[in-house]
Amino acid sequence: MRIRLDLHVHSRFSFDSAIDPAGLLEVCKRRGLAGVAITDHDCLKGGLSFAGELPDLLIIPGEEIRSREGEIIGLFLTEEIPPGLSAPQTMRLIHEQGGVVVIPHPFDYVKLTRMSWRRLGELADGIDAVEALNGKPRYWGANSRARTFAERFALPSTAGSDAHKLEHVGLVYTEMEEFSGPGEFKAALRGATLYGKRHSPWASQLDRWKARTRRAPL
């Protein structure tokens, strides 16, 4: 059976998001999502918390980690990974706990800290998947270049909305076979199909600022 997953979602545990469990459950049901990966900025608490609070959803605990060379997503994590390490160190710590390394929005050139094509190629043996469809790249050619990179290095692709607000959850998603655990997840990604549409990154920036001012205490 194939399922739909949004593999890049931020929760209220990110400083710039106000997504809460109740709202996430409602929007996932409405959009036919089996679940999401919670990938908060340098924080695993959201993924672990939401997994416990939402037993009817498939929640993959993750973290979007700021390495010194650019952002790296770790999925299926059990322990938080600190920011500020090198990319190889970050990837090693993800793999040591049985996690999956995903490179998010790799060619969004507006980002100040990101890895070049050459550097990503040097690291390709340690990359499990590339986010080839991101919901809000600020450079229009970013997703196309990410797809080309994934194909060139024979890496699986993922799709994620990069949602910081409920309205964006599920606008981009990965359709794949059901799986049990990170090993089957990686195998299932080989046959995945990516769907969705880009939403405005600039409107998203404004929404993120608003979220900072109205979010409830954790």
Image (tube, grey):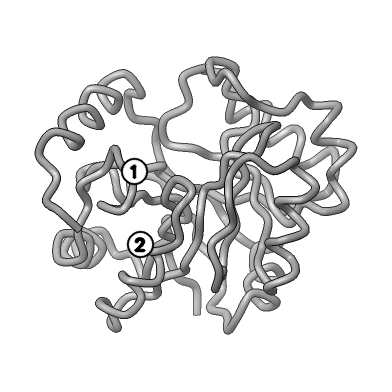
Is there any visible trace of residue 2 in the rendered image?
yes
Q: Residue at x 56, y 73 (%)?
A: 177
Residue located at (53% from left, 15% from top): 110
Name the kind of residue labelled 2 in the image.
Gly
Ranked by sequence position, the earlier of labels 2 and 1 is 2
Residue at image mark 1: 163
Relative placement, left or right, of 165 versus 109 is left
Q: Residue at x 44, y 54 (%)?
A: 43
Quarter in which the C terminus is drawn: bottom left
Give SS at disc 2: helix
Labels 2, 1: front one: 2
Q: Which mark is residue 46?
A: 2
Indicate the secondary structure of the residue bearing disc 1: loop
Above or below, 53 relative to 31: below
Q: Position of residue 69 (x, y in %)?
A: 70, 31
Q: Cα distance, mark 2 to mark 1?
A: 14 Å
* Residue 195 visible at all: no
Locate residue 146: give its quadrant. Answer: top right
- Disc 1 packing (10 Å; few <14; some 14–19; many ≥20): many
Between residue 13 and residue 164, name the one nearer to us. 13
Q: Is residue 11 left or right of residue 179?
A: left
- Please give the name of the residue rendered at 22% of the width and 61% of the height, measured from the top-left corner: 24
Give residue 86's mark: none
